[in-house]
Image (spheres, rainbow, N blue to C red):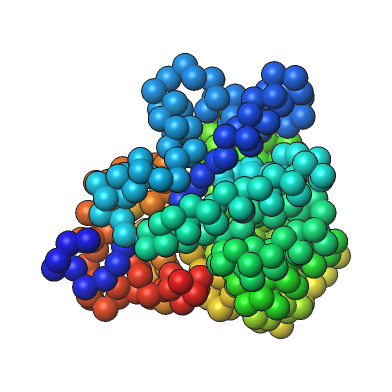
Amino acid sequence: MCAERTFLRIATEEAFAPPEMLRMYRDIIANDPGRDPGFMSLWGFFLSDKHDYPRNVVARLQDLDARRIQDMDAAGIDRQLIFLTGPGVQIFAAPEAVAVAISSNDMLADAIRRHPARFSGLAAVAPQDPPAAARELERAVRKLGLKGAVINSHTRGAYLDDPSFWEIFAAAEALDVPIYLHPQTPSPKMLEPMSEVGVESAMFGFGVETGLHTLRIIISGVFDRFPKLRLVIGHLGEALPFWLYRIDHMHGAAVRAGRHPRLKPLRRKFSDYLRENIWITTSGMAWEPAILFCQQVLGMDRVLYAMDYPYQYLPAEVQITDNLPISDADRKKLYQTNAEQVFKL
């Protein structure tokens, strides 16, 4: 950390992948290629070993020691909030998913114990088995010291607005920890038009998928049922801050018109939930106009810094964030204190 800095740089969407899970991914690619076309598109590329970029990403994903810390130092990052990369365990059948979530959380907790000043973490859970997911979240928070959960958007095409998953929300609210809703490739029902032109992943599909998922969660009344629940989404809110005015207007009009049976009255406006129950990170979006817009629309307390390591490991982007035309107090919020408050670091 530079001597003149008065804040820590905490990066809040930083990925890892256990070698065991990547071996399981390779087995799916080799033996069950029809399981999920989005998974095949994403991990067929990263595990192809044909180009430097995927090789470097996969190597960095597996490192929870010297190489990761060296990269952090080179970029000026003081602490990473680390969690399991997408789709995590959500591609597996339930028994496999539960087991890999447990072993991954143990591995991450061990790394945090080795490097307590540099790493914090979120727990992987298996939404395929909501009671097991709730139990694992409690174990990970109470026994391992993890700071919440990551869920990589849909689980084999199923979304968290379905009440069958709400036991996970209940556990997070009771434990007073956030859930990070992280992207993966879109579910098969919405994948094909994107994959036809190659935009199904980080260029476009991730944001559409996770923005839709967040919309579904809010519209379903999750935050009316769990008013203290905290949700974090990346990539400057997956474009939702830019749609707030129109979503508020059209949601209200649709509800009044009885346009769809699942569009029911909510206790607050859609934008209120985004400003009061949801925080966003800058992961992959080191772009001054967009960051300033989100801070203006949502408030300085709602936007957190993230790098999106190792997928978008670009140390020069830290300088863009350092140079934002905001006060020193607000810069400290962006880099440090918002993360400390949301994740109780």
Q: Residue drawn at (48%, 39%), measured in percent from left and top?
A: 61
In the picture shown, does residue 319 fall above or below 71? below
Could one spot residue 243 in this view of the protein? no
Q: Is residue 69 visible?
A: yes
Q: Above or below — where is 35 with respect to 225?
A: above
- Residue 248 point in image, percent of width and height: 61, 71
Residue 59 placement: quadrant = top left
Which of the 4 image quarters holds residue 201? Answer: top right
Q: Residue at x 56, y 44 (%)?
A: 85
Q: Residue at x 57, y 40 (%)?
A: 18
Of 77 and 116, the residue lying toward us: 116
Q: Position of residue 265 (x, y in %)?
A: 77, 77
Instruction: Give the percent coordinates (x, y) of residue 308.
Output: 43, 48
Snapshot quadrant of residue 228: bottom right
Q: Is residue 111 above or below residue 300?
A: above
Quarter in which the N terminus is drawn: bottom left
Residue drawn at (39%, 23%) of the image? 52
Residue nearest the observer in this picture, 248 or 173: 173
**How far across and how far down the image is residue 266, in percent?**
73, 78
